[in-house]
Image: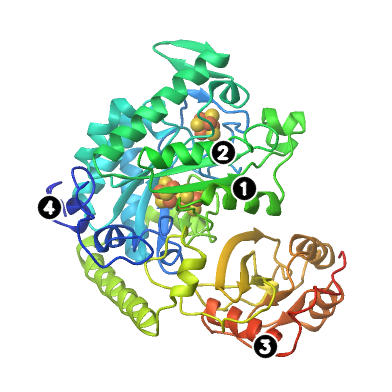
Amino acid sequence: MDLPVNESFPRAAAGCGAGSCGATAGQIDGLTDAIRARIEDHPCYSEDAHHYFARMHVAVAPACNIQCHYCNRKYDCANESRPGVVSELLTPDQAVRKTLAVAARIPQMSVLGIAGPGDPLANPERTFETFRQLAQKAPDIKLCVSTNGLMLPRHVEELCRYHIDHVTITINCVDPDVGARIHPWIFWQNRRVYGRQAAAILVEQQQLGLEMLSARGILVKVNSVLIPGVNDAHLPEVSRIVKAKGAFLHNVMPLIARPEHGTFYGLMGQRSPRPAELQALQDACAGDMKMMRHCRQCRADAVGLLGEDRGAEFTLDRIEAMDVDYEAAMVVRQEVRTEIAARLAAKRARGPSPAVSRANPQVVHFQPRVTKAAATAGRPVLMAVAARGGVVAVHFGHAREFLIYEASAAGARLIGHRRVESYCAGDESCGDADSALTRTIEALVDCEVLLCARIGYEPWGRLEAAGIQPNGEHAMEAVEEAVMAVWQQMLAAGKLTVPRSGARRA
Ligand code: CLF
Ligand code: SF4
């Protein structure tokens, strides 16, 4: 089914020229109703949405026009992905077919992004042909792009043409001297430019592109890679400047640098930031800037909810075998969307929690938290949660990541996530479970409580011995409510007026 590009689906009403949207009242957390409507089904722009809505990336953009010291193009674009090879590079036709197949099978997939493995705007024909076709064939899917920004000013009008309402620019610096330590060269006007001069051009184009998008009402997210000793002290300045120029959201991500990835930083031993450093930097950048804390540094071909990857279900040969009736799928997709909206409205109706919103104004919630604790003394507690779909739903042994919440009298605050290896590798064996458990405990050593749906005797004992209290009593409860219930229990038991005790290494 082909529809005209300007068919009046929701995304056509937003995006370019919609800078005036925001005139409506009804603000929660500083967001207008109109802005909230534009982000409430985008899993990256709304922390709440990421529990329910999925995104997918199509890897149509192989080339890049700059070099980053954290990137090896054998791997995914580090702008938007963890290192890992892109399984399949797609043509635009293949990408469109894959998108329709995924949207039909995963009706809560609301956003299609192009994020690599190179730079989408260094591959404009492939990128825009994909967007052009999807704007016609799948008008109910939001389109999203992530770029290094070098060619952004040149393509702003074309982004508007396809109603791309969400654009990410990776901006690691606003100072060319810092930039020269991150980006050794760029390809600009048919020649390679090096060092500070290259960084100065990149910074200039990024800032110009940001201003042009902001002027057109497009929601711009800025991604910054935190590189200890290189741009850590500089990023609060970056945050301040991009906010002043209209960026909607800032996502400070940790550098991933390992020798096996073959990147300059990896080979040179540049270290990645520790979780506490990342959190401190995000807090320092926050001010009144909206910060993203639930990014999963996705692959350039990721499919599914953030934190899961269902790409293996949608390889080209599998897609070829699928018979997709997208018109029928759109009916189901609308039903699913309506159902999720009703669940979220019910959650919202359970009660606002202004104290929690005030405690964490920089996080983009399109609904208020519902988990206000009694306003009484009690120290904050870090808790790791094995969650799916916003509830404590995952068995400890199956968890591949834990959400990290800080619980306090101000409420539950998501501060990040930690990736781990599954303790149980399969039905027959638990693989190298002992060392996987050791590494999981090391990753969660600053957490005092671990919430999960179920947990076995052996890991329970090891976690407890390391000072991390497992808790399976809140299975299938909403995450934030479970976190606050546990915090309240700890408070009532008098555990929160004294420092944490019993924390030991794995
Ligand atoms: Fe993809 Fe990026 Fe769009 Fe999201 S990802 S292009 S804005 S749809 Fe999201 Fe993934 Fe983080 Fe990117 S979690 S890496 S921020
Ligand atoms: Fe790699 Fe992306 Fe940097 Fe290009 S912009 S070098 S693809 S991380």
Q: Which comes sooner in the sequence, label 2 or label 4?
A: 4
Which corner quadrant holds the N terminus? bottom left
Which corner quadrant holds the C terminus? bottom right
Label drawn at residue 227: none
Tell me the distance, in whole angstroms, between the alpha carbons under discs 2 and 4: 40 Å
Mark 1 neighbour class, 10 Å CA radius: few under 14, some 14 to 19, many 20 or more: some
Q: Position of residue 310 (x, y in %)?
A: 50, 60
**Residue at the image position 70 percent from the left and 83 percent from the top:** 471
Q: Are the residues tagged 1 and 3 within 8 Å (C-beta)?
A: no
Nearer mark to the viewer, of 4 and 1: 1
Mark 2 neighbour class, 10 Å CA radius: few under 14, some 14 to 19, many 20 or more: many
Q: Which comes sooner in the sequence, label 3 or label 4?
A: 4
Tell me the distance, in whole angstroms, between the alpha carbons under discs 4 and 1: 43 Å
Foreground of the two, 65 or 323: 65
Q: Which comes sooner in the sequence, label 1 or label 2?
A: 2
Residue that carries the numbered disc 3 in the rendered image? 489
The residue under label 3 is which amino acid type? Answer: Gln
383 over 472 or under it: above or below: above
Q: Is residue 370 left or right of residue 229?
A: left
Element carrying mark 1: helix
Q: Position of residue 306 (x, y in %)?
A: 50, 59
Residue that carries the numbered disc 4 in the rendered image? 7
Element carrying mark 3: helix
186 over 220 or under it: above or below: above
The residue under label 2 is which amino acid type? Answer: Leu
Query: Residue reaching furthest top?
Result: 191
Tell me the distance, in whole angstroms, between the alpha carbons under discs 1 and 3: 31 Å
Q: Position of residue 339 (x, y in %)?
A: 31, 78
